[in-house]
Amino acid sequence: MSQLKKGAILNYITILITNVVGLLLTPFIIRHLGESEFGLYTLIGAFVGYISVLDFGLTNTIVRFVAKYRAEKNRVGEENFLATTMLIYFVISVLVIIIGAICYFNLENIFNRSLTLEELRKAKIMFIIAIFNLAIQLPGGVFMGICSGYEQFVFPKSVNIVRYVMRSFTVVAVLLLGGKAISIVILDTVMNILVITANAYFSFKNLKVKFKLHKFKKGLVTEIFSYSIWIFVFVLVGQFQWQAGQMVLGIVTNTTVVAIFGVGIMLGTYYGAFSTAISSVFLPKATQMAVGNASGEELTNMMIKIGRLSLIVLLYILIAFALYGKQFVFLWVGESFYESWIIALIIMVAYTLPLVQGFGNSILEAKSKLSFKAIIYLVFMIIGTFIGATYANKYGAIGMISGSVLGWLIVQNIMNIYYHKVIKINIPRFFKELLNKTFFTVIIIFILGYLVNYIPGYGWINFIVKAIIYSTVYAILMYLFGILDYEKDLFKNTTLSLLNKIKK
């Protein structure tokens, strides 16, 4: 099996482990830290996350340039590029330390409304450790980029999986021994150093890479940043989309509210992972269609096929979470996290359309037209954050996410116009065929699923019984009435392929 296929498999294993372990570990951490300290831990992570954007998208840029130099068999160019990149990262690490120091001495001014004196003391310790971690982690990302550029995916992805599993067990041990949030931050720093060391050893020992500055070229630096700038913009978008709310709430409310918001955000990102796992594998197809100058109708056909597959998966999760999500959250982390269910549900509803249209993003990437989306997203994510901050003063976490989501919805409407006018995707036909047969089937499923909620009881067994009944109803009705013939064939072929592999 090739490195590419093994890497893809390890990618899905990583997603599965991350989601499952996250669901199992989060309530354990909350119980041992308490809601307030868990919120403080989340808040500092979000704060340092903003400083981490100083990576400027260079890790992804390294993948592209290393692959380019390898294809050209230009060893000298590769060595010069890597040395130049490391010099850039040295400057970035110095910037991280300087900005971190400025923020450290102003933490009281930033969080004086929301944190107690004891929380400020802990926040300062966690922050300075996290800044040290970041100053090492950013240049350490060079080695991950080198491995990807050499198409060596198995080792770094395996190391990440081992790191995640080891971290999970170690976190449990540390908390059982009485450790707190500061202990987890120290643990994460140690784990990052070990991973960087392992990737560096692999790069030098197995890939034989060298960092040698043959000649410093300003033109090369310009070329590096001209490529990484749009990656950097999307990183900023991600920060405003997923982290800004925690920062705002940390300033205007308290750490308990931050904890509730953080749990809701986590559930929302897990929702997106299911669809991304489907749409991400279609980037090569999008590239082939773009290179082949596929017509707007051909792109529309493909977007409909992929969109329907994503929608069928997402609707299963969305309806289940709407009907039984509150019970799940109460059993999982406690009734005090009621608003986490509301926040996650708002995210899921607003996030469904962008996820269903994920192939559109692959087309933009294939056609090198991501700049428009990057700018529009960044502008409206910032606007949404400001609106959310206004609402947060009165409505707390729910107000914050409502403002942010408003920005998402506006952006998606703009992007649909862009897809229709510029990319020539037939958006009206997309929506019409997206809901073909599925719309009325979903209504029936929702009604039957609602009736399932009347099964008496409350605990985990009751929840599992409801989940099994709902899943059975969804699978049967969707297969019989909600999906098209080619989707049934795809399901049959996939099932038969899996059964044959199991038999072998």
Image (cartoon, grey):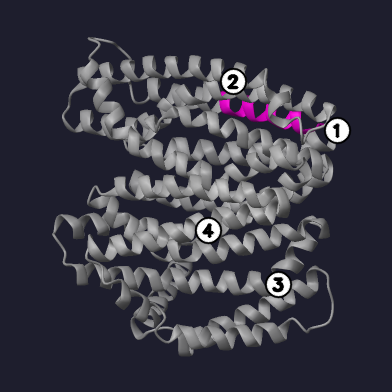
Q: Identify the residue at horizontal 78%, vertical 45% (top origin).
A: 256
**Marks 4 and 1, how far apart at CA:** 42 Å
Q: Identify the residue at horizontal 44%, vertical 68% (top origin).
A: 310
Task: Identify the residue under disc 3.
Answer: 324
Q: Identify the residue at horizontal 73%, vertical 59% (top origin).
A: 339
Task: Identify the residue under disc 1.
Answer: 178
Q: What segment is highlighted magenta in the picture?
A: 179-193
**Marks 1 and 3, how far apart at CA:** 34 Å
Q: Which mark is residue 468?
A: none
Which one is closest to the eye, mark 1 or mark 3?
A: 3
- Visible in this render: residue 412? yes
Locate residue 123: give its quadrant.
Answer: top right
Q: SS of the residue at dot 4?
A: helix
Q: Do the residues under discs 4 and 3 have CB atoms within 8 angstroms?
A: no
**Marks 4 and 3, how far apart at CA:** 25 Å
Residue 380 position in % (x across, y down): 45, 50
